[in-house]
């Protein structure tokens, strides 16, 4: 499967005095089956970029290719609708999109819109709910009786139920406490292991280090770096110019290395770090 | 002087579902206290109880040595200010200027004095250039700065930050943390920060650790944050520096298990030099 | 939404812009009342002249005014045609097929159309020269004498100003929710009636829920900042009545009196 952007530009409010070029010629290739982070300062174009992946936005010039779908500004919306199922897009604070009287109804809302028969959808809804860590008994409850974290999981179940091949997540752990964030990321890790291509827009570099294999760095509407997570974090000075902080582990390693240590900057866990420091001090 | 005194406080949202279970604590004037806990532990509820937005079921609350009752609400609220989590839902004015003025209007500050006060506090939070901007044109961090300005303008003795950085991006979070640090240094305000961010808690004078409506620990960060097992049980992480230093200590390296990253780096570098 | 000209504020600096909102509101009311006196075409001409002067004093272009009347054009034509065929007073002027067109019908219809145009024109001048918040403040001041009989003038004004402040925020939220639901296969543009209804529900319900929780948080924030509607408060924004405001009211009064006189005399 391939996901490519070729010279993609996107202008908001074209032709008005408020027109704004959000994407300035993006060339990009996303690897199938990867878990790729999309990082960059606020306003760098991340949100605009991801909305091209399910054709919510069309490029004002250039083209986006997702397998057999080619998205250009001339595409008719009807031909692109199936793409919204293939690429599941979870916005920030997705709990705000819940509206049905029961959780079951809310989760099957998506599949029904894509023509999946109700019985099949209900079956998948139960599975999706379990996948996000909530018991089947919640199916009949009202989504508004739940806590914020639980609501978010229901909203995500509403996207997972459509069994997307590509899952795009916009800061899925924003506002969650450490435990909640960890559970959520473990869920995505499981999906990734099953073969879903995952794109994660995040400001949390620790998350990127722990869970992602690739990263795309954006700045001012352009992709400025694209590579493995190790490659991206190998240049801390460059990242700080883009207002991107390093993960705690990586930053710690650099500080020690500046003072005579020779630690491998591509380490990703605290246990590895402890072993490496211990090795150098013994 | 005691800024806050809480004795045997109990609260429930619904019948027989207690949310705050008999907690007691005192906070001295000028202290920087972090109330730490997972989501649902009751920490935001405490904030609302302290400022009288929720009515306690039983127990006593004294704010700036005034007992909190229905009659003393207005009086208490003039000593304590609170910055909430959502930057939009506490921005009342149509511009930065109007929002800071809102609190002044409520406290019957004479109109002639308002402009000077507004200018002063806008400068303190570095939003002077944005005085006539509308909230829809501001970032989350900027809106929170305006919220802080509006509260400082009312000159409270106590500032509560109720997860006020959890909806911000790292840049906004840093802005607010620096601002709060500046406020603590320059004024003698009591600051109570409610959060689940461990790295922020490291910097507190004192941590009150909450779990399901009960105080589990109340003490200095070095003590509270070094109990890795308990923190994990409560759904929190131990501070990064502590995990590293504790792990090293366990494997035989002569380093102090500590929560301060700066000190840890220094100690490790010294050990390395000695080799 | 972006093309809406009715009600939009134009940030110029003119004599009208500098007038006190209370004067403009009261003046508008006086002119609107004048419009309904039957002083014939000469009466309307006088009011139109008054409008033209107001327009010049507000630095608004005539083309802008015409643009804001345009949306009403269709409705006016429709009304006009219906009225012409329905009214049967006066003498028969001519026949269209088997329908008789009466003299009075033509003049009365013309009156209706002219009145509508004048009302829209004057209202546009006021809203284009007065910031929505200043209008709210003006309304609050004018309604505050009614506080004595229990009318919550301050609360109403506070509600309006908060609503205005949240319009951009709510529009953004609407867009966000639409995108979220579109990502679940909702089509807001195409579809049968049932699908369209389902689409709208998936937008309106979350918006309402979010609005309610927003309102609660806002109320908490206001209370925490010592707000109480009944308590005494000072005001940051002050209105200052000046001589030109008195002149404005004076001239509107003169206009109204002239119209009354003309209608009594029965000018054509």
Image (cartoon, coloured by chain):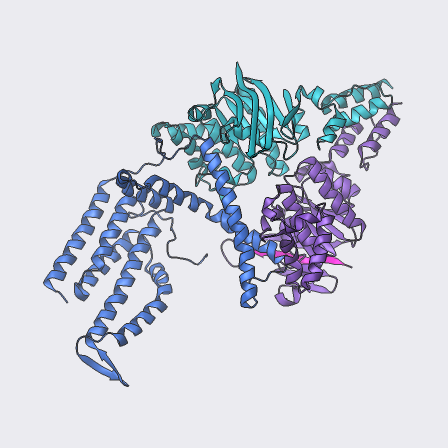
Chain colours: A purple, B cyan, C blue
Specify whether residue A5 is painted magenta. yes
Give how far across and how far down residue B209 sits, in percent. Answer: 66, 25
Specify whether residue A255 is painted magenta. no
> Going by the image, does B223 lie left or right of B92?
right
From the image, give the main secondary structure of the stretch colored magenta: strand
Corner quadrant of residue A165? bottom right
Q: Nearer the viewer, residue B155 or A261?
A: B155
Give how far across and how far down residue B111 sits, in percent. Answer: 34, 30
Residue visible at 63% across and 32% down in the picture: B41
Q: Nearer the viewer, residue C69 or A195?
A: A195
> Going by the image, does B249 lie left or right of A110?
right
Relative height, residue C6 to residue B148 (above, below): below
Residue B162 makes an appearance in the image: no
Relative height, residue B10 to residue A51 (above, below): above
> Going by the image, does C28 lie left or right of B185?
left
Relative height, residue C245 to residue C96 (above, below): above
Give how far across and how far down residue A196 sits, in percent. Answer: 77, 53
């Amino acid at each position: 499967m391939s996901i490519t952007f070729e010279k993609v530009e996107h202008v908001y409010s074209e032709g008005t005095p408020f027109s704004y070029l959000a994407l300035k010629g993006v060339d990009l290739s996303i690897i199938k089956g990867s878990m790729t982070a999309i990082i960059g300062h606020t306003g760098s174009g991340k949100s605009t970029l991801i909305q091209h992946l399910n054709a919510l936005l069309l490029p004002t010039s250039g083209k986006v290719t997702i397998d057999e779908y080619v998205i250009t500004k001339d595409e008719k919306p009807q031909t692109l609708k199936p793409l919204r199922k293939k690429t599941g897009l979870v916005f920030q604070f997705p709990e705000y999109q819940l509206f049905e009287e029961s959780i079951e109804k809310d989760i099957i809302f998506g599949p029904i819109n894509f023509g999946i028969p109700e019985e099949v959808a209900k079956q998948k809804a139960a599975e999706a709910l379990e996948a996000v860590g909530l018991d089947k008994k919640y199916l009949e409850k009202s989504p508004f009786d739940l806590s914020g974290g639980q609501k978010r999981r229901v909203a995500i179940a509403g996207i997972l139920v459509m069994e997307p091949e590509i899952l795009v997540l916009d800061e899925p752990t924003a506002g969650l406490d450490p435990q909640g964030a960890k559970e959520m990321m473990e869920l995505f890790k499981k999906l990734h292991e099953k073969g879903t291509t995952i794109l994660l827009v995040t400001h949390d570099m620790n998350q990127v280090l722990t869970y992602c294999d690739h990263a795309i760095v954006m700045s001012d509407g352009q992709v400025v770096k694209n590579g493995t997570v190790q490659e991206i974090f190998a240049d801390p000075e460059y990242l700080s110019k883009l207002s991107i902080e390093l993960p705690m582990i990586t930053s710690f390693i650099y500080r020690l290395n500046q003072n005579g240590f020779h630690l491998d900057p591509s380490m990703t866990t605290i246990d590895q770090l402890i072993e490496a420091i211990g090795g150098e001090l013994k | 002087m005691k800024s806050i005194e809480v004795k045997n406080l109990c609260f429930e949202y619904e019948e027989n579902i207690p949310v705050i279970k008999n907690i007691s604590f005192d906070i001295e004037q000028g202290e920087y206290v972090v109330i730490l806990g997972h989501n649902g532990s009751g920490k935001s509820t405490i904030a609302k109880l302290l400022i009288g937005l929720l009515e306690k079921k039983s127990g006593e609350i004294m704010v700036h040595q005034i007992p909190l009752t229905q009659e003393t609400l207005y009086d208490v609220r003039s000593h304590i200010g609170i910055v909430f989590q959502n930057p939009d839902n506490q921005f009342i004015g149509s511009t930065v200027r109007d929002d800071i003025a809102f609190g002044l209007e409520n406290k019957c500050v004479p109109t002639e004095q308002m402009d000077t006060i507004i200018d002063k506090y806008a400068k303190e939070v570095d939003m002077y250039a944005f005085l006539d901007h509308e909230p829809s044109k501001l970032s989350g961090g900027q809106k929170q700065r305006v919220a802080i300005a509006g509260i400082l303008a009312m000159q409270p003795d106590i500032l509560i930050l109720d997860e006020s950085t959890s909806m911000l991006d790292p840049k906004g979070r840093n802005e607010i943390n620096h601002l709060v640090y500046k406020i603590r240094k320059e004024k003698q305000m009591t600051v109570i920060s409610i959060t689940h961010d461990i790295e922020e808690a490291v910097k507190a004078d004192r941590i009150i650790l909450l779990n399901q409506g009960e105080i589990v620990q109340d003490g200095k960060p070095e003590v509270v944050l070094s109990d890795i097992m308990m923190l994990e049980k409560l759904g929190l992480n131990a501070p990064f520096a502590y995990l590293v230093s504790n792990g090293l200590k366990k494997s035989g390296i002569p380093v102090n298990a500590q929560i301060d990253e700066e000190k840890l780096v220094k100690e490790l570098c010294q050990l390395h030099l000695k080799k | 939404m972006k093309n809406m000209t009715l009600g939009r504020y134009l940030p110029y600096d003119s004599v009208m812009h500098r007038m006190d909102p209370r004067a403009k509101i009261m003046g508008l009311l006086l002119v609107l009342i004048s419009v309904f006196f039957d002083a014939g075409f000469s009466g309307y001409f006088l009011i139109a002249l008054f409008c033209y002067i107001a327009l010049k004093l507000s630095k608004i272009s005539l083309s802008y005014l015409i643009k804001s009347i345009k949306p009403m054009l269709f409705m006016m034509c429709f009304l006009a045609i219906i009225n012409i065929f329905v009214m049967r007073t006066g003498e028969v002027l001519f026949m269209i097929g088997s329908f008789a067109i009466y003299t009075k019908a033509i003049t009365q219809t013309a009156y209706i159309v002219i009145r509508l145009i004048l009302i829209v024109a004057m209202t546009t001048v006021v809203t284009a020269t007065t910031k929505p918040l200043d209008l709210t403040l003006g309304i609050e001041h004018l309604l505050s004498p009614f506080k004595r009989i229990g009318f919550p003038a301050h609360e109403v004004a506070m509600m309006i100003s908060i609503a205005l402040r949240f319009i951009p925020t709510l529009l953004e939220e609407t867009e966000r929710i639409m995108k979220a639901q579109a990502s679940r296969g909702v089509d807001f543009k195409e579809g049968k009636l049932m699908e369209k209804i389902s689409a709208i529900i998936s937008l309106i319900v979350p918006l309402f829920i979010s609005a309610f929780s927003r309102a609660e948080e806002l109320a908490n924030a206001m209370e925490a900042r010592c707000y109480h509607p009944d308590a005494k408060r000072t005001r940051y924004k002050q209105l200052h009545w000046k001589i030109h405001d008195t002149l404005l009211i004076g001239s509107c009064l003169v206009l109204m009196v002239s119209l009354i006189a003309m209608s009594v005399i029965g000018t054509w």
